[in-house]
Image (spheres, helix red, strand yellow):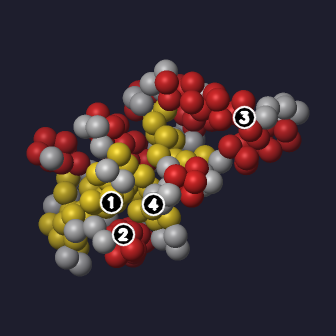
Amino acid sequence: MRHAVDQAGDLFSISAFSQTLKARGLDASKRTLSNYLGYLEDAFFVIPSEKFAFFQRQRTANPVKCYLFDTGFKQLGVSFSENRGKLLENLVAIELRRRGNDFYYYRDRHECDFVVADSGRPVSCIQVCWELNEKNRARELAGLRAASERLGTKTNFILTYDQTGEEAGIPLIPVWRWLLDW
């Protein structure tokens, strides 16, 4: 649970976590860790997001992104730096789950935070960042473009804390507006 809190929104690999535990002198099989991840999901503690792939076998062979079911759980961890972008991304995952959407992450050479699917077919790509600025603009746009081009989605946008407008033809939407309107 502590690892899930501290690494919320990051990639989680059962194999890598098993090796980390072994290095600390704790022995846990991959099956046991997989079971515990399932228990945390069943207890409404984490929301796992698989890498998008058209085949289930490819999805399960990759790490998952784990989001907290409630952003308040983040207060249970010890954080040395505030990452508001990850909290915003976690909030979007909670809302997508609340709305009953199937969602995944996209990762190839670039990463897109959310691929929303309907009956297994991708329908939209969503990138989330606190603020689109000179430091992250190229990365955020490249991830969204790569996912939308590869998957053929027509509805693509970037959610930010409070920016509106358009960037290279991609809508910037404040997350509060998306929460109210979408």
Is label 1 in contact with label 2 (beta carbons under 8 Å)?
yes
Say which quarter of the image contains residue 133: bottom left
Report the disc number at residue 148. none
Is disc 4 placed on a helix, strand or loop? loop
Q: Which residue is mark 2?
A: 151
The kind of residue tagged 1 is: Pro
Q: Can the viewer see residue 133?
A: no
Measuring 50% from the left and 64% from the top, which residue is drawn there?
107
Q: CA distance from mark 4 to mark 2?
A: 10 Å
Q: Position of residue 123 (x, y in %)?
A: 27, 59
Along the viewing direction, whichever of 50 and 163 lies nearer the viewer: 50
Is disc 1 placed on a helix, strand or loop? strand
Say which quarter of the image contains residue 131: bottom left
The kind of residue tagged 4 is: Phe
Q: CA distance from mark 3 to mark 2?
A: 32 Å
Is label 4 in contact with label 3 (beta carbons under 8 Å)?
no
Measuring 17% from the left and 70% from the top, which residue is drawn there?
166
Q: Which residue is mark 3?
A: 31
Left or right position of 27 against 157: right
Measuring 72% from the left and 30% from the top, which residue is drawn there?
32
Asked if residue 43 is positioned above or below residue 7 in the image, the reply reads above
Is label 1 in contact with label 4 (beta carbons under 8 Å)?
no
The kind of residue tagged 2 is: Leu
User: Label 1: how many residues lie within 10 Å, few (<14), some (14-19) or many (20+)?
Assistant: many
Q: Earlier in the sequence, mark 1 or mark 3?
A: 3
Q: Earlier in the sequence, mark 1 or mark 2?
A: 1
Report the disc number at residue 54. 4
Is label 1 in contact with label 3 (beta carbons under 8 Å)?
no
The kind of residue tagged 3 is: Arg
